[in-house]
Amino acid sequence: MTAVGIDAIEIRSGKLKLDLPGTFAPQKGDDPEKYTKGLGLTNSSFPDVYEDIVTMGANAAKRLMDRKGLTPDDVGRIDVATESAFDHSKPVSTYIAGCLEGVYDDDFTHANKGERKFACVAGTQAVDDAYNWIRAGRNRGRSALVIATDTALYARGDPGEATQGAGAVAMLIDADPDLVELSIHQGYGSKDETDFLKPNQQFPSVDGKRSMQVYLSRMREALEDYESVSGKIYLDDFAYAPFHTPFPGMVRKAALLAYRHVIRDTTHEDELAGEIGRQPREDEYADREAYEEAIRGYMDELKTTDQYRTWYDDAVEPTLGLAREVGNWYTGSVHIARVSALRNALERDREFVGDTLLVASYGSGAQAEIHAETVREGWREEIGALDVDEQLAARYDLSWDEYEDVHDVHEYDKDLDREVEAFTPPDSEFVFTGWGRMNERQYEYVE
Ligand code: CAA
């Protein structure tokens, strides 16, 4: 069977940044280590005044198409995943296609366009849709463009404000891909939850602590569901485990749970038994409460063991590199975790073709999905071509007052009584230029 997967990937960060320990923490009266060590974040990316989900998505897509030598005729499908859409009817993919048609000779008239919604897991769902379309043989030799783009803003003063971010990931999905092949097997954990939602409002209503519990529960279900089709997962099966990363501290919790699950009834559990005992089994306890307390004690010890730390440093920590620098990109978040892992493999000059990633996506509301990806021959060239380091280094460092201005500019319903100047000059990119007669957002390409 022909391999189908991600052929190429491009990242576009918002062009501004907020320094969390240096600028945010002092304003909130917090210890900077709450951000660097607790949440695990150093900076958040923000969009400049002329950037939004369309410009970031279109700029990522254009760079991807140019690098791969594609024209619109090569792309049969454009799906956008976002939780930041500003239009309830016209999909963001049409705005992005319109931008791209302004700079290429041919057009996307033939392309099926849509928008995927299920909080942060929608990016992975859009990749699935493209995969299925290609597998079904409906693509007429064309590839699919999937764009995960978000401005992950929270109301000012919300605890989530510390985890904001803005950026886009464009992915080309194709047969015989250069980067990774997607597994047929998938596992799901999905339930109706009221933990994080935006009922006709721009900024989310969030029950932060509950959202973390829901994340962990759905992930566990997805892992069990994945194993029910793939067979038991072993620790050594995977080189990296990229997770959806709302903030790295969340992944620290998920990784510990996953590790406990995966080593159960293996030699790894036996090796640890002398040091911290075997994992508590429910049937050994009088009631659920006693069992849960025993589990908590086991986990506290497990996370301090050399075995766990070595695995975490090897398989999980490297997936967090970009997230620490940019914050939460919602639909794009798990996709930058994958890129972080591949960048780590490149830095380590790892022999990596044929190795596997276990990719764990999550969306509030709530659903987790787990699948495997196998690294392909072209991975070095694809990952080496990214310019994300240059983008991050070039970001404008906002002062607190400037951050408040930028937040106001991007709040759709806010009537600003003043003009906020751009902080960076546009340079060979799509920019937002204002509203049209039907209240549509308008864009142009600036040389
Ligand atoms: N030094 C070191 N660590 C410190 C510290 C210090 N001085 N001060 C605090 N910390 C630690 C805390 O102990 C805590 O870590 P643990 O959970 O491991 O104990 C961590 O820093 C965060 O501190 P708080 O829990 O006090 O932080 P908070 O209450 O202000 O906010 C939050 C945390 C609830 C996650 C909030 O940021 C939030 O609401 N975020 C948005 C929701 C979210 O991201 N949920 C994640 C799951 S949902 C999801 O994944 C979907 C999505 O993308 C939104």
Image (cartoon, rainbow, N blue to C red):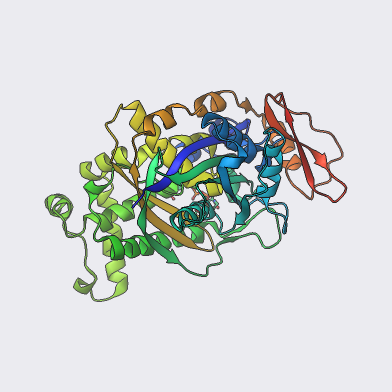
Residue at 67% over, 25% down: 428
285 relative to 426, above or below:
below
Residue at 65% over, 59% down: 198
Q: Position of residue 367 (x, y in %)?
A: 47, 62
**Residue 41 visible, this angle:** no
**Residue 328 visible, this angle:** yes
427 relative to 159, above or below:
above
Q: Quadrant of the C terminus?
A: top right
Residue at 72% over, 35% down: 102
Residue 359 placement, left or right of 99 = left
Task: Give whichever of 437, 73 is nearer the camera.
Answer: 73
Q: Position of residue 2 (x, y in %)?
A: 36, 49
Residue at 46% over, 46% down: 334
Q: Position of residue 293 (x, y in %)?
A: 30, 64
Residue 80 placement, left or right of 438 = left
Task: Give whichever of 136, 189 is nearer the camera.
Answer: 136
Task: Give whichever of 20, 69 is nearer the camera.
Answer: 69
